[in-house]
Image (cartoon, grey):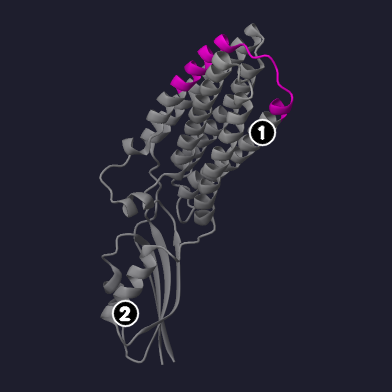
Amino acid sequence: MKSETIHHCHSPIINEGNPLAERNTRWAVYLTLVAMIAEISAGLMFNSMALLADGWHMSSHALALGLSVAAYVAARHYATDPRFSFGTWKIEILGGYTSALFLIAIAGLMLFHSVERLFNPSTIHYDQAIMVAVFGLTVNLICAWLLKEDHHHHEHTDEHAHQHQDLNLRAAYIHVLTDALTSVLAIAALFGGKLWGAGWLDPVMGIVGAIVVAVWAAGLLKETSAVLLDAEMDKPLYAKVSERLAKRHPKAEVSDFHVWRVGRNDYSCIIAISTIHQTATDEFKASLKDIREIRHLTVEVNQS
């Protein structure tokens, strides 16, 4: 059996980051901090536990958004570090994964305090709470607009856009979106309590909000963990490479195939091919050279 191996590498992967997303996430952090200080101060001034709780809840989002910014900074800082042979893109994914864990913790706290409030109701200062909740909602909507990914990527098909998703940015976006959702639910509950005396609406809406936040966080956790664990064999690239080799080299058999993601739409591949013909590795390489997603390719040919 004759074995020949070729390593086909494009230029080293240097993560260019997402400067616009980083800048907008910084602005979201600043706005969230302003809203947090306003809600905590108003809660202390008006003796409103509801406002204090929402203010501290917003502080956890400010921390998570700050984590997203830190991930961008770290990825950019180490972009040319030779120790990161496949680039620093996964630092951003790690930031998104950690933010998802924060969201799950936040959902758990929301659920705990809402159930506690349901069985131990307290007096709510509706007018002040509504005013500050509306302010918090406005801040969250501005942050959501800043972090919406449409600002950063345009004109992709659904599949292609999904592959280009900035999961760190999406984590930040989900944080402010969940905060906006809780603000909407809180405003609805506060109006219900003020107009109809339905004080139980406040904790019930809190429980609903906690469930929605947990579902969104679980989805983000699933996506980011799949990237971190290199669960990429079900991606279209695997089918594309397999079909291309089967079409152009019908007598060859792919005996081993590994693919993992090293960028938003960049992949590394290791392919082992068995064939009865004397086929140079350059021929297999040429069959795959126009697949732009492949940044690193190792092909091993075993002739029997």
Give the quadrant of residue 291.
bottom left
At horizontal 38% and vertical 35% (from top left) the residue drawn is: 148
* Residue at point 50%, 61% (across, down): 231
Over which residues does the magenta segment extend? 116-139
Asked whether 259 falls inside the magenta stretch, the response is no
- Picture coordinates of residue 247, whole percent (x, y): 27, 79
Image quadrant holding the N terminus, namely bottom left
Within 10 angstroms of label 1, few (less than 14), some, or many (20 or more) residues? some
Residue 58 image offset from top left, x and y in percent: 57, 25
Q: Quadrant of residue 202?
A: top right
Residue 109: which disc? Answer: 1
Which element type, helix, strand or loop, lies under badge 1? Answer: helix
| Above or below, comparing residue 214 to residue 162 in the picture | above
The foreground one among 131 and 5 is: 131
The kind of secondary structure element at disc 2 is helix
Q: Which residue is nearer to you in this view: 149 or 78? A: 149
Which residue has dot 2 on it? 246
Secondary structure mostly taken by the magenta-highlighted segment of the chain = helix
Crowd around label 2: few <14 · some 14–19 · many ≥20 (10 Å):
some
Image location (x, y in percent) of residue 234: 44, 65
Q: Is residue 95 visible?
A: no
Q: Answer with mark 2 or mark 1, whichever residue precedes in sequence.
A: 1
41 lies left or right of 16? right
Q: Amino acid at mark 1?
A: Leu
Q: Nearer the viewer, mark 2 or mark 1?
A: 1
How far apart are the alpha carbons under marks 2 and 1? 53 Å
| Residue 2 rendering spot, x and y as whole percentages | 42, 89
Amino acid type of the residue that numbered disc 2 sits on in the rendered structure = Ala
